[in-house]
Amino acid sequence: MTNFSYIATDGKGGSVNGTIDQPDRSAAIAALVKQGLRPVSLKEAKSGSGSKLKFDFSNILGSNRVKPDQLVIFTRQLSTMVGAGVPLLRALTSLTGHLDESPALKKILLLAIADIEAGATLGDALAKYPNTFNDVYVNMVRAGEAAGILDDILKRLAMQQEKNTTIRKKVRSAMTYPTVLICITILAFFGLMFFVIPQIGNILTDLGGPDAKLPGITLMMLAISHFISTFWYIVLIVIGGGIYAIIRYIKTPKGRRQFHYFVLKVPAVKTIVIKVAVARFARTFSALMGAGVAVLEALNVTARSLGNAIFEEALVEAAKEVKNGKSLSKVIATNPLFPPIVSQMLLVGEETGQTDTVLVKVAEFYEEEVDVAIESVSSIIEPVMIVIMGSMVGLIAASVMVPIAGLAQSIK
């Protein structure tokens, strides 16, 4: 008997996976059909501990998540095939067969194909996987299917995803250098506290005797070093627990809002956050409007895609005002979060009926501004971190040199 692993759908459209022992592939398919299941994927299972270890290792590496770059490539390829007149199911099946580098995306698409074969639309099939296909993606696909312009919508989606991914990479790249410097500073501090300061304390005690009067700064450094060396496990628990508690709190709605509010008050960082949020707003709202999504729905979907709770609240309130009859440009103009150029360009778009086209220009402008802002902050961070590290080294040097100088004078 051969062991097969399968993914199938039941009569209610739910996903079922597991293993089955049958003599061959045909017998396995027949057995699943008798159980009322529709096989989507059927593979010979690899037995032994090696495959289990491989599975667990891939989970640790996060291979079960779909990378943004893979989603962009898939979207572009699907757009090309649909635009060339290839039927949707055939296009999806063909693309799925070449997704060995992304097993997570392949599994999702196999299940989506089964849903489409059962009568669901592409948008409804993808909506079941919000971690991969967000609200913007699903709503644009639905609008494209309704208007019969799915290939054009997919092109816009791919472009929007590429822009968002580019901004995300630039922000992460800008954060890499200061993060590395902070880590080095922390490691250097604990290294000095564990190994250097205790030795210096012994030297000073040998030179001046146990009753030697040491400066306050030296006593402070020795006390800190002694506490960290003696109660290092408490320090680790406090630091680890504090970081864990902060992260957990930030993940709550209240903590997320307070963190985003705090970020908008930090000089330099505030500029980057605002420009990234405005660029995302313009790019996403433009794409949704161009796809034919209703204004209120476009505003609510865009709000959830900005990644900042304060901007999200602003757009939700704007949607309420628009629902009451106000124009979006007037509502945005009264909100200090959005630069004046956004409301002015929105007004032009409303007057000409080309809101989506105008907002693309706004998005391109602020995406360039994000580059400039990141470079400016990066140029500021380097000297600031050098000053911080230099101050730490200077403090330790002072705590050593001052008592040595005092001892030298007493010897004279």
Image: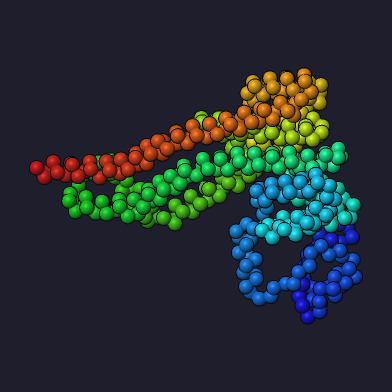
164 relative to 86 in the view: left or right? left
Decide if residue 252 is on the left or right side of residue 213.
right
As rendered, which of 230 and 334 lies closer to the eye? Answer: 334
Residue lying farthest to the front in this orientation: 84
Is residue 130 in view?
no
Name the residue at 18% across, 42% down: 405
Using the image as rendered, state which of residue 257 and residue 43 is in the foreground: 43
Give the image quarter of residue 101: bottom right
Is residue 42 among what the camera can see? Answer: yes
Q: How is the image coloured?
A: rainbow
Q: In front here: 381 or 350?
A: 350
Quarter of the picture containing the C terminus is top left
- Look at the picture and state if 345 lies above or below 102: above
* Residue 85: image location, x then y, percent: 84, 47
* Side of 306 where 236 appears, left or right: left
- Furthest toward the bottom, the residue is 1
Choose top left, top right, bottom left or bottom right for residue 216.
Answer: top left
Name the spot of residue 66 as percent of width and height, x first: 68, 52
Q: Residue 348 at what x, y percent from top left?
A: 73, 20
Quick one: quadrant of the N terminus?
bottom right
* Residue at 69% from the left image edge and 49% from the top image edge: 73
- Tell me the residue at 65%/66% (across/down): 55
Residue at 84% across, 57% down: 114
- The number of numbered badges drawn on the structure is 0
Picture coordinates of residue 172, whole percent (x, y): 55, 43
